[in-house]
Image: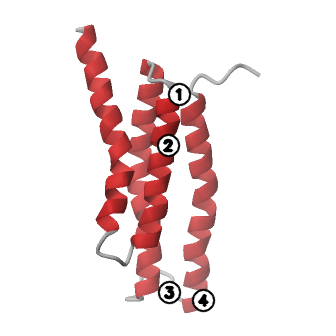
Amino acid sequence: MAPTLLPVTFTFISVLAICLMPLTGWIGLYRGKTNILRADGGDPTLFKRIRIHGNLMENAPLFALVLGASETAGLGSSWLWLAVATFLAGRVLHYMLYDKKTRGVAMSVTLLPGLVMGFWLLFQLQSQV
């Protein structure tokens, strides 16, 4: 087998894919229990589950892209793993704080590593011009 070109990015994408299945099932099982087949039917628990899943799907693709770009551009693996750990911690915090006024903290933790890598990438590009 050929060596993996982007091991941190590919590991993140793999973990994300593995996590997505139970998260989707978490919604599907509740839909079956409540017999709500479309949207959230006004059910606050279903709405919460849909939004937790949706928020992950809204944020993870761009994070994966900036992670892959940063890895390709030469950001060190320790920094990349720190970014992945921070992003995932933000997602767990989002789940835990979803009904709290402090859930903005979870979003900040989620978005921070992508923001930092985005600036790092711009700096790298600017230094090549």
Q: Which residue is mark 4?
A: 33
Q: Which residue is mark 3?
A: 36
Q: Which residue is mark 1?
A: 77
Tell me whether the residue at label 2 lies in contact with that at label 3, contact meaning CB atoms closer than 8 angstroms.
no
Mark 1 vs 2, N-terminal side: 1
Report the residue at 57% width, 67% height from top: 24
Is residue 127 depicted above or below 58 in this figure? above
Which x, y percent locates residue 30? 57, 83
Mark 4 vs 1, N-terminal side: 4
- Number of other residues with Cα within 10 Å of mark 3, as a class: few under 14, some 14 to 19, many 20 or more: some
- Number of other residues with Cα within 10 Å of mark 2, as a class: few under 14, some 14 to 19, many 20 or more: many
Which x, y percent locates residue 120? 31, 27
Kindly identify the amino acid type of the residue bearing the numbered disc 2.
Answer: Val
- Number of other residues with Cα within 10 Å of mark 1, as a class: few under 14, some 14 to 19, many 20 or more: some
Which of discs 4 and 1 lies nearer the camera? The answer is 1
Tell me whether the residue at label 1 lies in contact with that at label 2, contact meaning CB atoms closer than 8 angstroms.
no
Looking at the image, residue 14 sits to the left or right of residue 58; the answer is right
Q: Which residue is mark 2?
A: 84
The secondary element bearing badge 4 is classed as: helix
Looking at the image, residue 13 sits to the left or right of residue 117; the answer is right
Which of discs 3 and 4 lies nearer the camera? The answer is 4
Mark 2 vs 4, N-terminal side: 4
Mark pair 2, 4: CA separation: 34 Å
Kindly identify the amino acid type of the residue bearing the numbered disc 3.
Answer: Ile
Which of discs 2 and 4 lies nearer the camera? The answer is 2
Quarter of the image for residue 44 reads bottom left
Is residue 22 depicted above or below 38 in this figure? above
